Amino acid sequence: MEKVRMGILGIGNMGTAHLKNVMEGKCPEIEVTACCDLKAERLDYVKEVSGGKIACFEKAEDMMDSGLIDAVLVAVPHYDHPRYAIAAMERGLHAMVEKPSGVYTKQVREMNEMADKCSVKFGMMFNQRTNCLYRKMKEIIESGELGQIRRTSWIITDWYRPQAYYDSGNWRATWRGEGGGVLLNQCPHQLDLWCWICGMPKKVTAFLKFGQWHNIEVEDDVTAYVEYENGATGTFITTTGDVPGSNRFEITCEGGKLVAEGGKLKMWKLAMTEPEFSKVNEYPFAKPDMEVTEVELDGSHPKHPGVLNAFAAAILRGEDMIADGREGINGLTLSNAMHLSAFLGKTVEIPFDEDVYYEELKKRIDASALKDSKEKVFVNIDSSYGS
């Protein structure tokens, strides 16, 4: 096999963006040979831009059984991510899944179990893991250079979306259609990075506001507090209602801190760790000496094409992917825990009872209603994140 023949399932915002990336030659080891969507006008678009060279299907199973593809990129609404990934793997097809991995961990766990049974490559579209800023943060934290983590804080409020965004699709911002709001749609990347770099917390207390800034069913404002196994604490604040917003990720350790903001990474490194200093210091208002530097980055951030190129390399040569698909459950665990904390009005311990979460979610699904809308597809290929 010289190229991976890929079928794209779902030609919406992100499916169209991935198609465009491949057709522009940004993924030289991938060829899109098939696309699938329920909407005829989207398939007409594929036929037009490909000159009829890409086979089009209305049913996912027909595309998967066509013999025209080696891998499936799943870019459909959230609830169907595990369903179609499982169907692909059962057929011996490699699977790349758009974020989030699913809506609730119980279904994602089933997807992961299927991946363990099948000898196929399974990846998640966590394109922010390709960002040199976050790769460097992970490298520094894992090196132990700054010692143990004491506090993490991410304020990610530059996800502004006007009402027109939510009105662009009847599934958007409904429990029945999307399964959540800013945590499930915009923030899977940050939740993944938070776990990837800092590890999984043990306790979550979250305060969510549903339809606070928009006419929607789901959360558009979140403030969460977490506790880690070693006693460290963390906060996560996000919304789609702030203009202008902020994006500041800060990790404080016993030997200094890291701050990622504005595309730059700053590091404060203490001459000795805080526990060491506090033990030997004799002056009431003293502080340890420290050095402040802007950390040098390699400047690389290949985004979505980088994830797909690594996926192709994994299929063709057994190389490492950017994110194994099984890791998608980590950020979703945090998202579900925040929702459950807000639903029940109490602190939630991880792991939590997945059946309780599903029952709480189902109550909201049963009371949910898809909206009337004039759906349009807006391709935002330059976005660093997603839909």
Image (spheres, rainbow, N blue to C red):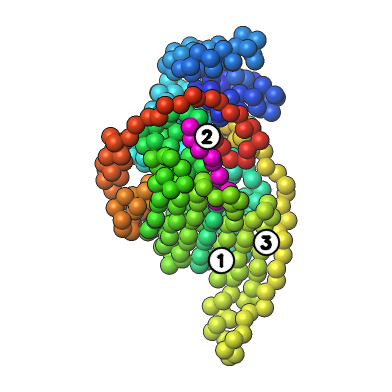
Element carrying mark 1: strand
User: Magenta span covers which residues?
Assistant: 157-167
Which image quadrant is residue 102 in?
top left
Left or right: 31 as drawn, with respect to 167: right
Give the percent coordinates (x, y) of residue 325: 48, 37
Q: How far apart are marks 2 and 1 (CA)?
A: 38 Å
Q: Identify the residue position indicated by label 1 in the image.
A: 252
Secondary structure mostly seen in the magenta stretch: loop
Q: Identify the residue position indicated by label 2 in the image.
A: 164
First in sequence: mark 1 or mark 3? 1
Vertical order, 311 against 42 (above or below): below
Give the percent coordinates (x, y) of residue 186: 51, 42
Element carrying mark 3: strand
Vertical order, 353 against 365 (above or below): below
Closer to viewer: mark 2 or mark 1: 2
Left or right: 274 as drawn, with respect to 235: right
Amino acid identity at mark 3: Lys
Closer to viewer: mark 3 or mark 2: 2
Which image quadrant is residue 32 in?
top right
Residue 82 appears in view: no
Name the residue rendered at 43%, 67% in the picture.
231
